[in-house]
Amino acid sequence: MLICIKFIKKNILNLKVTISLFKYVLNTILFLFAFTNISCNKSIDGEGDLDVFENIIETGQLPYISVKSDEIIQNEPKVPGDFYVKEYDSITHSSPIGIEYRGSTSFRLTDKKSYGFEIWDENNEDSEMEILNFPEEEDWILMGHVYRSTDQRVFDPSLMHHFIGYELSRSIGMYASRSKFVELEVNGDYKGVYILMEKLKRDKNRIDIKKLKEDITGGYILKIDKTAGGDVIEGFQTLSYFENNWDDDARYSESISFRSDYDINGVKISFPPFNSPYHPAQYLETYFLYEYPKAEDIADDQKQYIQNYIRDFENSLFNIDDTASERDYNNYIDIDSFVDYFILNELTGNIDAYRLSTYMHKNRGGKLKMGPIWDLNIGYNRQDRVPFTDWIANYNQYVPRDAWMVPFWWKVFLGDDYFKQRLKERWTQYRSNQFSNQTVLNLVQETADYLIENGSIARNYERWTGISVDYLQVIEALKNHLQDRLLWMDQKINSM
């Protein structure tokens, strides 16, 4: 059986997107073969460091990661462990780490947990290192897809929602987390396919803004999101606490955040901020979390500066003169970053866009920029809250009292001729190259082929049983959705 696999041509990833009958049959055979889980590796008995890998799995081109820890992994704080990366028959990275579970809602919803980890030195201090040729840093994420057996829940059966969106973002020059597929075992327990990705943070190779020092004009990173984890919790908490305490998702305070002066309809808010979680008027509020500098580090004058900056920007949205060639809001924002952020989230159908997992940043002396995009696991039409034939930015029309709603900014932009013209220009530019049908669909098909041909999909779904996944059908549905969305956006944007 394995001899047959080895004779399959290595250049299968370059086949055309349209799956011929031959390609469909070939992939199906490979998919079934992979379930045998028989390794082509030679025996690693007695080969020293390779003994840290308790599962002898031929992952092909996918790196295989082993995490070892003598302590029970918690939601926080991080516990010490060891981290090994195997590529083919060689260990290409090993280091001490601190590791914890990550995620708020996703942590509660999934059996397949995601992890955040830091590279540590021998003294358990942060240590910057390269991993899999990514620029050196200490903070990383191992992202798993949301899967829960009890109710057959699966957000992303393709396993590639994050990866595709981030690749598309970087293709247009907008930074997104560098990501690479890996397979993972933790203390010998095979966990399946994960994505190793960069944690979003200030860094010359990530969100490239200056350190905030004496000049209070920057840099800053803000986030519109739930509160979670270290934002609101002091001291050790058991895992059961994180599994059940939903209130901590909405526990905003003056120490970690500030509130917009306006509600989601652009009306001045008259009631005080920082009320109890899920109070009746929470859906009207938009909070900005301090991401950089962190809440415990940001000084009062820095808080005041960035709050005033956002306030001035929001006020400028009420001073739009349709007869003018420029807009007051251009004094505060990089308009093209807002347009690109809109395009990426709408193309990927990111239902959390604008209102959750929403990053923005301001460099020293610069304007506010949107991004990077983040958290795309329930995008790509894997939701039923906003119709396919509308903008995700119009979320408020369909879910009128969600605890987290889209800020009024985007309604203003979609009604503004200047913004719409910039949108049309940039969409036209991208459609002729980075977002052409062929480029986007090739990216999906090549990614799927890569995962199938390396046996990763079969192993992942053998590990996470309880759901029936026709992976080839999943990929066809994803490609069909993206093609339909591209065409719909053509029609919608060109008619603006």
Image (tube, rainbow, N blue to C red):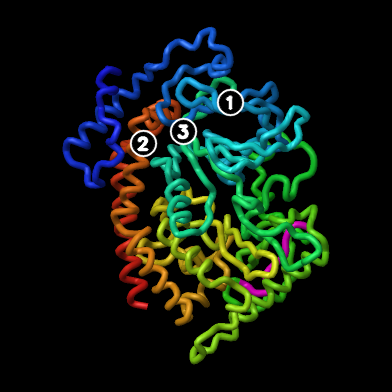
| Mark linked to residue 84 | 1
Q: Which residue has dot 3 on it?
A: 193
Residue 364 placement, left or right of 50:
right
Q: Residue at x 70, y 73 (%)?
A: 309
Q: Quadrant of the C terminus?
A: bottom left
Task: Farthest residue to the left: give it.
Answer: 21
Q: Is residue 403 visible from the viewing direction of this image?
A: no
Q: Earlier in the sequence, mark 1 or mark 2?
A: 1
Residue 495 spot, x, y in % from top left: 33, 77
Q: Earlier in the sequence, mark 1 or mark 3?
A: 1
**Residue neighbourhood size for the residue with mark 1, other residues' Cα within 10 Å, grouped as few (<14), some (14–19), many (≥20):** many
- Please, what is the dominant secondary structure of the magenta stretch? loop
* Residue 211 lies in quadrant: bottom right
Q: Above or below — where is 391 with respect to 230?
A: below
Q: Earlier in the sequence, mark 3 or mark 2?
A: 3
Q: Is residue 178 visible from the viewing direction of this image?
A: yes
Q: Above or below — where is 321 with respect to 54?
A: below
SS at mark 2 in the image:
helix
* Residue 25 lies in quadrant: top left
Q: Above or below — where is 67 with respect to 235?
A: above
The stretch in magenta equals: 255-263
| Mark linked to residue 450 | 2
Marks 1/2: CA–CA distance: 22 Å
Q: Amino acid at mark 1?
A: Tyr
SS at mark 3 in the image:
strand
